[in-house]
């Protein structure tokens, strides 16, 4: 086993804090979390995805329009 495999997963309060953004987005309260991290989002868009973003809400919307999404829906199987 490597040292990476031996790391323990967070539990209790630490786990809850790590999962807080997920819970907020599921409750449609993501704006509480996402609105505070414009600098990080701007850097991710610029460095990782190559989109120039000025940090405004409209700039982030434009990036969202340019990112290709695939929607996967289950098919109904007919007997």
Image (cartoon, rainbow, N blue to C red):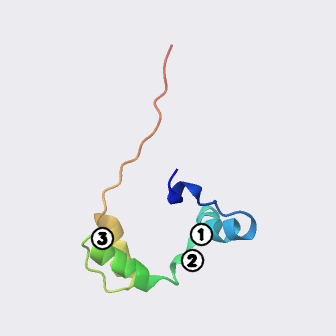
Instruction: Point out the tag, 3 or 1, that comes first from the N-terminus.
Output: 1
Q: Residues within 10 Å of mark 1 (few under 14, many from 20)?
A: some
Is residue 76 shown above or below 70? Answer: above
Query: In the displayed image of the protein, which residue is found farthest to the top?
Result: 79
Residue at 48 percent of width and 82 percent of height: 37
Q: Nearer the viewer, residue 32 or 16?
A: 16
Is residue 63 shown above or below 42? Answer: above
Q: According to the image, label 3 marks what residue?
A: 48
For residue 10, what is the image quadrant?
bottom right
> Residue 10 bears which disc, if any?
none
Q: From the viewer's perspective, tell me whether residue 65 is left or right of residue 6.
A: left
Residue at 41 percent of width and 85 percent of height: 39
Q: According to the image, label 1 marks what residue?
A: 21
Is residue 71 shown above or below 24? Answer: above
Instruction: Point out the tag, 1 or 2, that comes first from the N-terminus.
Output: 1
Q: Nearer the viewer, residue 13 or 7?
A: 7
Tell me if label 1 and label 2 are in contact, CB under 8 Å. yes
Residue at 63 percent of width and 60 percent of height: 8
Label 3 vs label 1: CA separation? 21 Å
Q: Residues within 10 Å of mark 3 (few under 14, many from 20)?
A: few
Question: Residue 65: x, y in percent?
Answer: 32, 66
Which secondary structure, mark 1?
helix
Q: From the viewer's perspective, tell me whether residue 68 is left or right of residue 27.
A: left
Q: Disc 3 vs disc 1: which is toward the camera? A: 3
Q: From the viewer's perspective, tell me whether residue 17 is left or right of residue 62.
A: right
Q: According to the image, label 2 marks what residue?
A: 33
Question: Residue 6: x, y in percent?
Answer: 58, 56
């Amino acid at each position: 086993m490597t040292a990476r495999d031996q790391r323990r997963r967070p539990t209790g309060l630490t786990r809850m804090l790590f999962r807080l953004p997920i819970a907020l987005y599921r409750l449609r309260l993501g704006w509480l979390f996402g609105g505070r991290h414009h600098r990080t989002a701007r850097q991710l868009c610029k460095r990782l995805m190559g989109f120039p973003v000025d940090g405004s809400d409209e700039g982030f919307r434009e990036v969202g329009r340019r990112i290709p999404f695939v929607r996967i829906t289950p098919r109904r199987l007919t007997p």
